Amino acid sequence: MAFVSVSSSYLTVFFLISFCLLPLSTRGSDPDPLQDFCVGDLSATPSVNGFPCKPASEVNSSDFFFTVKEGNTSNLFGVGASPANVLTFPALNTLGLSMNRVDFAPGGLNLPHSHPRATETGIVIKGKLLVGFVTTGNVFYSQVLTAGQMFVVPRGLVHFQMNVGKGKALAITAFNSQLPGSAVVPRTLFASKPLIPDEVLTKAFQADKSVIDGIKSKFST
């Protein structure tokens, strides 16, 4: 009887361990795709994991190729981003990646921002860029990069790029999301709809209401 009791205990422990490890084995990596592609049907309502697939009979070669045009830098900040994500390049649907072309005029600044759904990596193609990000521990990391040098910004961290060279600059960035999203810090704080109340911002920045209103006016367009 004692032998039977010990064996049952071992079996119980074995099954408990197996049950606990089961989720780890099934979530260790992304699932294998069940189809070659899923070109997004942007006319349909998106679901949690992307857009519904365009019928295969309607897919053609042009769906898998995309031209990224030079960004317009004739603006206050001297930067123009041309995104290649699922909204502009539907063939990226369900593939978990996207890219941007980012052009900089001399002195151009890609405003401090974060990507809530993706890590970003990039390579400088032309010019000289100061690239930096801030951790959740409030540590600032930065470096000036030139053509051929790369950078990475961990998911969700606030970061920026600034052209510190004499001429134009160009960078290509990539994301591990088909739609990484972008929360631009100044616009998020000073141009939300509706606006964040002045009393919140005056206390947060320890500044007079006139200062806050002045900043809001610059981002109102």
Image (spheres, rainbow, N blue to C red):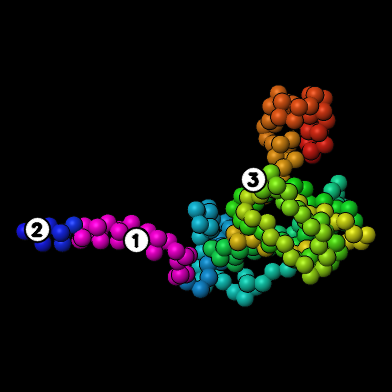
Which circle marks residue 2 in the picture? Answer: 2
Residue 192 location (% of width, % of height): 69, 36
Q: Secondary structure at mark 2?
A: helix
User: Which range of residues does the magenta coloring cover?
Assistant: 10-34
What's the residue at 78%, 63% (across, down)?
Answer: 171
Question: Which residue is more in the foreground, 76 or 52?
Answer: 76
Q: Are marks 2 and 1 in contact (CB under 8 Å)?
A: no
Q: CA distance from mark 1 to mark 3?
A: 33 Å
Residue 14 in which image quadrant: bottom left
Q: Is residue 36 left or right of residue 165?
A: left
Choose mark 3 or mark 2, whichever is in front: 2
Which circle marks residue 22 in the picture? Answer: 1
Q: Earlier in the sequence, mark 3 or mark 2?
A: 2
Which circle marks residue 128 in the picture? Answer: none
Residue 162 location (% of width, % of height): 82, 54
What's the residue at 40%, 60% (across, down)?
Answer: 24
Q: CA distance from mark 2 to mark 1?
A: 30 Å
Question: Which residue is more in the foreground, 15 or 67?
Answer: 15
Amino acid on which the number 1 mark rests in the picture: Leu
Q: Is residue 26 left or right of residue 111?
A: left
What's the residue at 59%, 53% (across, down)?
Answer: 117
Question: In the rendered structure, does residue 5 fall within the stretch colored magenta?
Answer: no
Q: Secondary structure at mark 3?
A: loop
Looking at the image, which residue sits at the far left?
1
Q: Which residue is mark 3?
A: 136
Residue 153 location (% of width, % of height): 68, 56
